[in-house]
Each structure stands twice: as structure tokens, then as C-alpha cells.
Image (cartoon, rainbow, N blue to C red):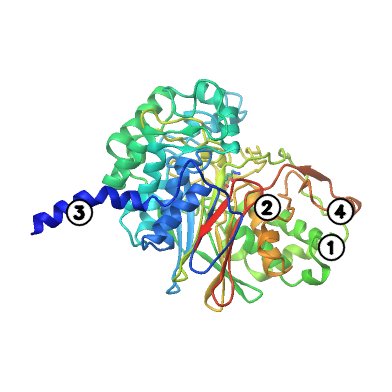
């Protein structure tokens, strides 16, 4: 009888699996604005959001969905979704527990403080950006397993949609085709083995991308857990890749990598509790500082995008980024006066030098380049029917990271080493400068700006948000929170309204092209240099309304898409 049952299950299994393939990877649409009653996922790619919803339908919770979505992003959004990068997760579970999981990359054991300086002491930032030496020790897979403790379904079930997408392929979007074509020369130049990302001829919208090697790696992880990545075949392949390309990640670096469960940042802002990421992200401290600096001003009376409101916000941004450059780094390695610089008195003191109607001046030291357009980090938000809320930002740093695909293993390695301060005062790819606190040390985690955030009111999550955008992440999240909580914008406008950015150095205000002209003019008259730039970030947002109705919004600036029911 038992044998019969077993045989029946074996026979039915393929059919059951087929039934679980809840979406068509060759035929899908983007949903920018979704209303749902029970649960929702919003991410940078429709198929990744659908993968998250697939496991929610199978009985998974928001953490299951966040894991499945991240694994799917590693397949369908290779410019930023990843196995070879890192990220941060914050969550607020339905029983009130809050979580912050740090799976940021770390510097390899053989890294050295001055490893990107030439013999004249000049920073060679190409080396921290492209190729094998740019990669930090990947953290994502460890992060997924650290999160899995709070999930419900077996890991292999969460990996199933990603494995399917890698093995059978999916139709690529126009943006993806353009991205792969743009990187073709880099892929050819920087790789030691053929990769799925380069084909004969150019990529076109709707082409199928199959990633057989990546499917194999995903299967190893699904079968062997952490060991499927950090030890055995995959680790061997990473180290062999390093040897071929002159990188320094060792087997010991991989085997010793651990995600860290951190104490999340929690603070009050006008009756809301903001839950966000602590160091080694500067994001949480950054928004705590900026919100603290503007909290007592009557922004809602001054109005959304009025010159008065925008000027105040710019001056808060300037001061927070000056602190970032000076104080912040991995607290496991350096002392950071977090309590002081997030304290009310300190923040009020910082604004003593603020003069309404007149631009402050950033100190006159070596200025960086304006942050350039990039869409290479990625954010996702999930809420489930029990009220578990998850916010994850994950990254390879630059687009397609170091552009190095691990030979035989099919995944891209990050170029996160550039987030260290390669040389004090020398700007990184986002124009950010740093000091000793963020200098390279073996095993240290490079400072990040990623700011996954959840807003809680009356003991319920009301907003889940985050964005990519390098140095603009913190100012985007700052504006997203003010848009929704203070200026009273609806969910769609909260995400899509034009954004602006000031990061202390360079001393300029960057604005999106559709930022109101009249406000730009008024700022110029106050003494600001205002520069228009390419779109800022790709914000994802879930709003949970009183009574439990859910609204999910994917940013108009990308392929971002929501799914749910
Ligand atoms: O951790 C950081 O702050 C950066 N590596 C994030 C990079 C990023 O957002 C790129 N995408 N736009």
C-alpha cells in the first residue's frame, strides 16, 4: 500500500510541478500599480515578482517570497540581481519582531589598504571597478540562508522558479537587451570563459536568454545549502576564476563568509516608527539624520516641491553626506559615534548654520564627479496576508558588477570594492568621498548607501520601500518618506514624482529633467548650482492602508512591476 502511494506521488510529481509554474516566461506584462487584498511583491522585473507570488500561493510567507524573488532576479535581472553580490534585508514580522540581515560583501583576506594605488600613490579606480580584483567576497547566498530561518517552505521550493527560468530561458525586455549589448565588449574583454550573456549578433527584445551553468549552480545551492556555494564545486570554480583573472578571493574567504544579524535602526518621526538598515549601510543613519533635521519645520505648509521645502531638504542632505564621508564605516572595524550623530540635539545643532533663502557652501576640498546614471542595484518589497513585511536591497554595485562571470558557474561577480574609500578624498564611481573609517582592511565590509525601509504605525506596517541609485539611494528614500508621510502624495506620485539630490561633494544640486523649472530658478537665485541629470533610482513601494488593503507601485523609471492577489 505504501509502495503504491509512493509510486503514485512519483508519477504525479512532474504534473504537480507543472501546475505550479504559475507564469509564462515568454509572455508576461508589467504591472506598475497593483491593488491587492492579501499579499504583494514589487521588484525590478515582472518575472521576479511573479516568482515571489508563486511561492506565496504555495503557502509561503513574505520571507519565502523575498528569497524566491531574489533568486529569480539573479536570473532575469543579471545587471543587479545576483548570487555573486550582496545585500541587506529588513523585515517586520507579524508578531512584532524586527530584523536586519547584513549580507554585504567583505574585503578578501588578501586585500590591502592601498591595493588600488599605483606606485605614485594615484588611485586606479578602473581596478576597483572592472575585472577580478574589483570583487568582494559575495554575501547573497549566505543572506538568503540567514533569512530562510524566518521562512516556511523548503529552500529548494523557493529556488524552483529561478532554476526553471535559468534552465528553460525567458524572453528578455528591451532594457535588458540594450544592457547586454552595451556590455558586450566588456564581457568579451574581462572574461576567461564563454558566457551566456554574449551571443553571435546583438540581443533583441523578446530573445530567449538561457543560463544553463547558472541553473546548475542554483541546483547545487538548492541541494547542498550554503555548502553548494561557499564550498565544493562552486567555490572551486570561483577560486579558479580568480587565478585565471588575477583576483584574490580565496577558499578560506568563501568558507568563512557569514551573514550578520544586526540590530535594526528604529526611530520615531512624527508619530511613525521608521525601521531601516544600520551600518555597514550608511542609509539608515542618513535618513534618520535627514528626517531629524527637517522634522520640526512646517514642510506641509510650505508645500511639495516649493523652493522653501526643497532648500531645507537640500541642506539636510548636504549635512548628512558630510557626516557620512567623515564618520561612517564598518563598525566591526572602526568606532562610529552613531548615538551622537543621530541624537536630536546634534541634528538641531547641525541646522544652526542653515539660512533660509541662501545656499550653504560645502567645504572647499577636492570635489567628486556628479553621480552618473546607473540602475544596477535593485530593490524589492513584499507583504503577506499575515502582515509580515520585507524590504530588500541587493546589488553587484555597477551594472553587471565587475562584468566577470565565474567560468562554469554562470553568475556575475560584484565590483563592490569600489564602495571602499580607495584613497581618502578620492571620489568613487558615485562621486562619494570617504575617510579612514571606510578604508580597505581584510574582512571589512565596504560602506553602503542601500536603505531598505519599513514604516510602522499603530503596530502595523504601513509603508515598505527602497531603491537602487548608488549615492542617491538615501536622498531618494528620504524624499519618498516625506512625499508619503508629510506632503500627502498618493502612492504612484510618491514613487514617480521628480527627485533631486545633494551629497555634500560635489557641491551641486542634481535634479531630474521633469523637476519644476520655477523651483530650479528659485534655487539658483539662492546661490545653488542646479544640474539636470538622468533618472534617479528605481523606487519600489507598498502601502498598506487602514483595514489592510494593499497598494504596490513599481517605478516608472524601469521595468519594475508588481504582482499579488
Ligand atoms: O551599496 C551601495 O551603496 C552601492 N554599491 C549601491 C549601488 C547602486 O545602487 C547602483 N545602482 N544604481
Is 328 above or below relative to 187? below
Q: Residue at x 50, y 28 (%)?
A: 131
* N-terminal-most mark, 1 or 2: 1
* N-terminal-most mark, 3 or 4: 3
Tell me if 56 is positioned left or right of 337 in this view.
left
Q: Which residue is mark 1?
A: 308
Q: Report the number of numbered marks.
A: 4
Question: What's the CA distance linking mark 4 and mark 1?
Answer: 9 Å
Tell me if 410 is positioned left or right of 529 in this view.
left
Q: Are marks 4 and 1 in contact (CB under 8 Å)?
A: no
Which quadrant of the structure image shows residue 310? bottom right
- Give the secondary structure at mark 3: helix
Q: Which residue is mark 2?
A: 321
| Other-residue count near label 1 (Cα within 10 Å), few / some / many at <14 / 14–19 / ≥20 | some
Is 49 above or below relative to 185? below
Whole-percent x and y of residue 240?
A: 35, 27
For this rendering, which residue is in front, 116 or 379?
Answer: 379
Q: Which residue is mark 3?
A: 9
Amino acid at each position: 500500500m505504501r509502495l503504491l502511494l509512493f509510486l503514485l506521488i512519483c508519477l504525479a510529481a512532474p504534473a504537480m510541478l507543472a501546475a505550479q509554474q504559475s507564469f509564462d516566461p515568454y509572455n508576461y506584462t508589467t504591472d506598475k500599480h497593483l491593488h491587492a487584498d492579501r499579499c504583494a511583491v514589487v521588484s525590478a522585473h515582472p518575472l521576479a515578482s511573479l516568482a515571489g507570488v508563486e511561492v506565496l500561493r504555495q503557502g509561503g510567507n513574505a520571507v519565502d517570497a523575498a528569497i524566491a524573488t531574489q533568486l529569480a532576479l539573479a536570473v532575469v535581472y543579471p545587471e543587479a540581481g545576483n548570487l555573486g553580490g550582496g545585500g541587506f534585508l529588513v523585515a517586520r514580522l507579524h508578531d512584532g519582531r524586527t530584523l536586519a540581515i547584513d549580507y554585504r560583501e567583505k574585503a578578501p583576506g588578501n586585500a590591502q589598504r592601498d591595493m588600488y594605488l599605483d606606485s605614485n600613490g594615484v588611485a586606479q579606480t578602473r581596478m576597483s571597478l572592472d575585472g577580478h580584483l574589483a570583487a568582494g567576497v559575495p554575501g547573497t547566498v549566505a543572506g538568503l540562508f540567514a533569512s530562510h530561518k524566518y521562512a516556511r517552505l523548503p529552500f529548494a521550493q523557493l529556488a524552483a522558479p529561478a532554476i526553471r527560468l535559468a534552465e528553460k530561458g525567458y524572453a528578455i525586455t528591451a532594457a535588458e537587451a540594450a544592457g547586454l549589448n552595451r556590455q558586450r565588449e566588456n564581457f568579451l574583454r574581462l572574461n576567461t570563459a564563454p558566457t551566456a550573456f554574449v551571443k553571435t549578433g546583438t540581443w533583441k527584445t523578446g530573445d530567449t536568454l538561457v543560463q544553463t551553468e547558472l541553473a546548475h549552480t542554483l541546483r547545487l545551492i538548492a541541494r547542498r545549502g550554503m555548502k553548494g556555494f561557499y564550498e565544493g564545486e562552486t567555490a572551486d570554480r570561483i577560486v579558479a576564476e580568480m587565478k585565471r583573472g588575477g583576483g584574490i578571493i580565496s577558499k578560506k574567504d568563501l568558507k568563512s563568509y557569514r551573514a550578520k544579524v544586526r540590530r535594526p535602526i528604529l526611530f520615531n518621526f512624527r508619530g511613525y516608527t521608521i525601521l531601516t538598515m544600520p551600518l555597514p549601510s550608511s542609509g539608515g543613519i542618513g535618513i534618520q539624520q535627514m528626517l531629524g533635521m527637517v522634522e520640526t519645520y512646517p514642510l506641509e505648509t510650505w508645500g511639495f516641491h516649493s523652493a522653501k521645502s526643497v532648500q531645507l531638504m537640500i541642506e539636510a542632505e548636504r549635512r548628512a553626506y558630510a557626516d557620512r564621508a567623515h564618520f561612517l564605516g564598518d563598525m566591526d572595524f572602526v568606532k562610529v559615534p552613531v548615538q551622537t550623530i543621530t541624537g536630536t540635539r546634534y541634528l538641531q545643532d547641525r541646522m544652526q548654520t542653515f539660512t533660509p533663502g541662501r545656499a550653504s557652501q560645502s567645504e572647499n576640498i577636492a570635489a567628486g564627479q556628479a553621480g552618473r546614471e546607473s540602475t544596477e542595484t535593485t530593490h524589492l518589497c513584499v507583504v503577506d496576508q499575515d502582515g509580515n513585511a520585507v524590504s530588500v536591497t541587493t546589488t553587484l554595485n555597477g551594472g553587471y558588477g565587475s562584468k566577470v562571470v565565474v567560468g562554469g558557474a554562470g553568475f556575475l561577480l560584484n565590483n563592490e570594492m569600489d564602495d571602499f574609500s580607495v584613497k581618502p578624498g578620492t571620489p568613487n564611481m558615485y562621486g562619494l568621498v570617504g575617510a579612514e573609517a571606510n578604508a580597505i582592511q581584510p574582512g571589512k565590509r565596504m560602506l553602503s548607501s542601500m536603505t531598505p525601509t519599513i514604516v510602522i504605525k499603530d503596530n502595523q506596517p504601513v509603508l515598505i520601500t527602497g531603491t537602487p541609485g548608488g549615492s542617491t539611494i538615501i536622498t531618494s528614500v528620504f524624499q519618498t518618506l516625506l512625499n508619503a508621510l508629510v506632503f500627502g502624495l498618493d502612492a504612484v506620485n510618491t514613487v514617480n514624482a521628480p527627485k533631486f539630490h545633494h551629497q555634500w561633494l560635489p557641491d551641486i544640486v542634481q535634479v531630474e529633467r521633469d523637476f519644476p523649472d520655477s523651483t530650479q530658478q528659485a534655487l539658483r537665485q539662492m546661490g545653488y548650482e542646479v544640474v539636470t541629470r538622468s533618472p534617479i533610482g528605481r523606487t519600489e513601494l507598498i502601502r498598506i492602508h487602514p483595514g489592510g488593503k494593499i497598494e504596490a507601485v513599481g517605478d516608472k523609471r524601469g521595468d519594475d512591476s508588481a504582482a499579488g492577489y
